[in-house]
Image (cartoon, coloured by chain):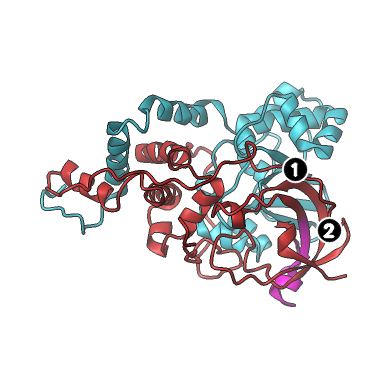
Chain colours: A red, B cyan
Amino acid sequence: MSTIQPASGIADMGGDDGWGAAPRPDPQEPPFKEDWEKRAFAMALLSMRLSGTNLDAFRHAMNRLDRAHYVDDGYYGRWLYGAENLLMDSSIIAPGTVEARAVNMSGGQADEPAAPEAHKPDYAPTAAGSIRQIDAPQKFHVGQRVRAKVLKAPGHTRLQKYTQGHVGTVAIVEPAQVLPDTHAHFIAENAQWVYTVAFDSHELFGPDAETFTLNTDMYEDYLEDAS
Amino acid sequence: MSSEMTVNDHIPIALRTEALEQILVERGLVDPAVMDGFIKTYEQDVGPLNGAKVVAKAWTDPDYKARLLDNGTAAVGELGFKGPQGEHIVVVENTDDVHNVVVCTLCSCYPWPLLGLPPSWYKDPAYRSRVVKEPRTVLSEMGLDVPEGTQIKVWDSSSEVRFFVLPRRPAGTEGMSEEDLIPLVTRDAMVGVAEVTGS
């Protein structure tokens, strides 16, 4: 668990071109379209507890997937592959186990790796959920101009690439929360203030962009003063 | 299914899911009844009807609406709505001048206690990638034409804050009760890709 595995980059798709037209909503769509999606959903929720990890680690486990694993089987496909990553990270299942079982279930013959000795991260949350009470003063205030930093660390982050380097205005001070960048890797909770920052669309996407305001949440470590 | 399948073949996702469940159940790590419980919760109990109740109450009770916009988490909690993916709710109001629309570009964060699990369009890479760059065009593709004079605000959910849109109350519904308004409120309107219509 000591090595930080890099994100593939596929999940950070905000602002990207090439994904085609937005689908028309179907108001009658059920929560799950196929039965396997239900089982994948439930197992993914359980995988965090089983692997002794957390929601941020689960998100990063999906962000590590390559494009095919992230996209081809849809949302619950990436949940399943993400859950498998967590279970393998903590040695709950050995690599190749699921594939071998699937072959055996379909009439083929494959040797299944033995169940390994579990190796969960040395980690326990200080409280339930992600919101924390902290004593530190807020570094930024509503109305302040702030710049989203440019991040080059290989691990988990919630700082989207389309906002990096751009200047916006603090719109809302949100409750303090654990920092996904360190929490996903069990380094520290690093609870800190979160700010909803409003960006002008032209600042993000240039003078020819549609006119609108983009609001998104920034952990305090993501920001620097730009006033 | 071919009996010549090997571990190097692509495993169809339904089979793969079944294989993982079988392994985890066999090793005593997962209880299928617990899984059934999670599934039932989000198939039957927690869905957009919760959000619709919040909206109808806000439309008919100005004090509630004020509390909802001031502290969304507490106000939806008054109706009993809380739980995973609902730690902190921020409600944004659509008006004649402002249209709000919610996305999560990095995954598909969504206010589960109010809307249940996200619909497929919300999880689609086309929506996730483009609504933060060209929202007017994307909304139009999805069937909503936002008037030129209306300001668009996009909310990209990147922390554990969950955004929820309070849609505009449709004209002609002034005489309707809270209870009668609930069925008018759609999931898509509470994310901001549709308007509520009067019938």
Is B191 displayed left or right of A114 in the figure?
right
Q: Nearer the viewer, residue B50 or A10?
A: A10
Residue B181 is covered by the magenta coloring: no
Name the residue: 72% across, 28% down.
B77
Magenta region, residue range: A196-214
Graded by Cα atoms within 10 Å as few (under 14), some (14 to 19) or many (20 or more), the crowding at tag 2 reads few
**Vertical order, B126 against B34 (above or below):** below
Q: Nearer the viewer, residue B150 or A166?
A: A166
Which x, y percent locates residue A174?
77, 48
Name the residue: 44% across, 43% down.
A51
Q: Which of the numbered marks, if any, corresponds to residue B90?
A: 1
Asked if residue B173 can be seen in this view, the reply is: no
Which x, y percent locates residue A135?
81, 46
Distance of mark 2 from mark 1, alpha carbons? Answer: 21 Å
**Circle 2/circle 1 CB separation < 8 Å:** no
Which x, y percent locates residue B129?
57, 62
Is A34 displayed left or right of B127 in the figure?
left
Which x, y percent locates residue A35?
36, 36
**Vertical order, A214 against B54 (above or below):** below
Is A211 displayed left or right of A75 in the figure?
right
**Vertical order, B26 against A3 (above or below):** above
**Amino acid beneath label 1:** Val
Is B38 displayed left or right of B12 in the figure?
right
Q: Nearer the viewer, residue A61 or A123?
A: A123
Which residue was labeled with disc 2?
A139
Q: Secondary structure at mark 2?
A: loop
Name the residue: 52% across, 51% down.
A57
Asked if residue B46 can be seen in this view, the reply is: yes
Q: Residue furthest bottom?
A: A207
Name the residue: 84% across, 27% down.
B61
